[in-house]
Every structure is written in structure tokens, then in C-alpha cells.
Amino acid sequence: MFKPLIALMSTLTLWLLAANATAATLPRMDLEELVVRSDAVVVAQVETITTELDARGRVVSTITLTVRETLKGPARRTVAIRQLGGYHGDVGTRVPGMPVFQIADRGVLFLSGNVAQHPASVTGLAQGFFRVALGPDSATEFAIPQVNNLNLVVRDRAQTAATTSQLRSVAPAELHQQAHDLNTFKARIRTIVDETQPEEPR
């Protein structure tokens, strides 16, 4: 009798706690920063999503994706992402700014971590996920930014002292304000990878 009530109260508590933090604060990232700070960039499709509760009773999701194309990093058939948030039975955890995945989603993902050995995380939270979808002509594919519930900031130098700085809230980068032709988007990423990767010793 009491178990369903306890589960319901747990769900409500977690969602109310999450609602108090309506936006995550992160440094704003443009395309070059996303590429440089990511260990892997892939075009991939979500195959499975599994969830579990951590020691604090929060939902943790593991998203397994089939890689369609590798734009940076080691070539892999599959990669996994592990992140806080999702549903596990009657318990739900919502994290503002965290990318949201569904089975069969396709997207361009900027990943941090050793994708060959461990589950990765999405670079810059939702800034690092662009959902792939067909355009109005039902033929052209677009990479669509998924930024929401993010308070993006940049660091400004204070005029009073060269060694101090302060954070200023800003709008998303132009990168995250419009959809991008997928082929053009991938070409831009490859160019940045070529221009920024270290030269091999001769």
C-alpha cells in the first residue's frame, strides 16, 4: 500500500528539486571550441537507453549509439553516453541543459572522454548535440541545435585590474541559433579538425 505512495513522493521530490534550478550556467561555445574540446565528434543514431538509480536516488541514463560517421577521434561502430537524468520506473530526474535523447534519434554529437573504453559525456551539455532531420523538401538533411534551459556566459576582463574578470550572460552563439545543412556542417567540422590537430613528428 505504501510503496506506490513512496515512489510517487520520490518522483515529485526529484522533479521539484530540479525545477528550482531552471537553467544551467555554462561558458558559451562556438563550433571551433566544441571541436577542439571534444575527444570525438560523430554522426550517430540512438539504439538503446538504459537507466539506473545512483547512490543518491537520482536517475542515470546510458545511451548507446550506432556510429554512422566519425568526424574526429577513433573510429568506432558504437559509442555510449552516460549522463544524469531520465526515468527509471516511477522515478524521474530532470537536469536543466542536459541533452534529451529518444530511441532512433540521429544527430551530430560532440563527445568528451575516452569513447573507446568508457561511456562519454556530451561536450557543453546540450551545446554539443545537433539533431539530424529532413528539411521541407524531404531530401536535404539538417543539423538542428538543441540548446534550451542554458544560461550561457562569457568571461570579461575587468577594467580595474588585468588579473580579474567577471562573467556576463549572453545569447547562444550563432551556431546554436539556426539549423545547418548537414553536409556543410560536417565539412566545417572536418576543416577545424584538420586545422587544429597537432602535426605528427617527422
Image (spheres, rainbow, N blue to C red):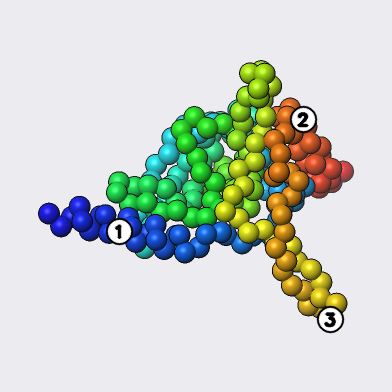
Q: What's under tag 3, amino acid-wise? A: Ala
> Circle 1 — which element?
helix
Up-down relation of residue 6 to residue 165 (above or below): above
Q: Residue at image x 63%, y 59%?
A: 151
Q: Quadrant of the N terminus?
A: bottom left
Q: What's under tag 1, amino acid-wise? A: Ser
Pointer 3 with pointer 2, Cβ within 8 A: no
Residue 192 % position (x, y):
80, 41
Mark 1 or mark 3, which has the lower sequence index?
Answer: 1
Label 3 and label 2: CA atoms lie apart by 42 Å
Left or right: 17 with respect to 7? right
Residue 118 % position (x, y):
52, 47
Which quarter of the figure has residue 12? bottom left
Q: Nearer the viewer, mark 2 or mark 1?
A: 1
Label 1 and label 3: CA atoms lie apart by 48 Å
Q: Residue at image x 69%, y 21%?
A: 140
Which quarter of the figure has residue 27? bottom right
Image disc number at residue 10 = 1
Q: Residues within 10 Å of mark 1 (few under 14, many from 20)?
A: some
